[in-house]
Amino acid sequence: MFKLMNRWWKYMTAKLTGTFNEKADPKVQLEQAIQEAHDQHRRLKEQAANVIANQKQTEIRLNRTMEEYEKVAGNAKQAVLMADEAQKRSDAAKTTEYTAAAESFANRMIALENEVEDMKSLHLQASQAADQAKSAVNQNSSMLQRKLAERQQLLSQLDQAKMQEQLNKAMASLSETVGDEVPTFDEVREKVESRYAKAKGMSELQGASVEGRMLEVEQASLNVEAQARLSEIRAQLGLDAGTAAAPAVAEVRAPGEGA
């Protein structure tokens, strides 16, 4: 039963995740990813700063311990010299006191030497960790810069994709049926072309009809009368009739006669 519930939970999680990814705005998701990258880089820098600070503190303690060691070593040398001078003066009491002080300084030197060695080891480890932290920050900074540059490219591609989707949608709407009372673009075009072809056909039929031939005959008769009237005017004016163009008499043929 538990295994079945676990499988059902994983199935529902995958289903909801898929539905969310389908409906989510890629632009918003991209900004979320960039913001997360910024936050991750900030956290990495804070961790690196802590590592570097630990290295600096270790270095400070090491330097302070070494300074103390040099001071104790100087005191030990001074105590030995003073004990030697007291011994030369046959001052047993001072010799014993200075010798005891020299031994105390020597014991402190031994302890400081061990402490210095330990601190050197810690300082080396802290320095290596600091170098690794700096390298990690630099690498992550380069990755962040690449992501920022890629974001601009992705945003441009996203805008182009949206524009192309709108264009595809508009082109598809020209050929798809909107409704029973609204014709498509192809249907309107076919209707216009049909009417245009029919009008052209009717025009050709009118030109070849009897009425069309009758109009041609009437126009020819008017041309003959006009030429005759021009000849009369030239004769009245005493113009040379020979120079005048002879009136052309149009030969009228019945439909169907040969030339």
Image (cartoon, rainbow, N blue to C red):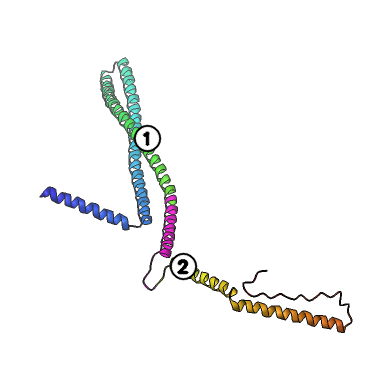
Q: Regarding mark 1 in the picture, which secondary structure is present there?
A: helix
Disc ID at residue 190:
2
Task: Give the x, y percent position of residue 113.
Answer: 30, 25
Estimate the spatial distance between the alpha carbons at disc 1 and disc 2, rounded to whole Å: 77 Å
Q: Is residue 251 magenta?
A: no
Give the quarter of the image for residue 125. top left
**In front: label 1 or label 2:** 2
Query: Residue lying farthest left?
Result: 1
Question: Which residue is depicted at the point 44% across and 48% down?
Answer: 149
* Disc 1 packing (10 Å; few <14; some 14–19; many ≥20): some
Q: Give the residue number, with chain letter if any, for mark 1.
A: 131
**As rendered, which of 40 and 73 lies closer to the eye?**
40
Task: Give the x, y percent position of residue 175.
Answer: 42, 64
**Three-letter code for the amino acid on which mark 2 is drawn:** Glu
Relative to 246, is 182 on the left or the right?
Answer: left
Relative to 110, is 31 on the left or the right?
Answer: right
Q: Which residues are magenta?
A: 153-181
Task: Give the x, y percent position of residue 188.
Answer: 45, 69
Query: Against 89, is 133 above or below?
Result: below
Give the quarter of the image for residue 202. bottom right
Q: Is residue 165 magenta?
A: yes
Of the image marks 1 and 2, the number of the one nearer the N terminus: 1
Question: Which residue is depicted at the point 78% across and 76% down?
Answer: 247
Query: Against 243, is 59 above or below?
Result: above
Query: Residue lying farthest front?
Result: 257
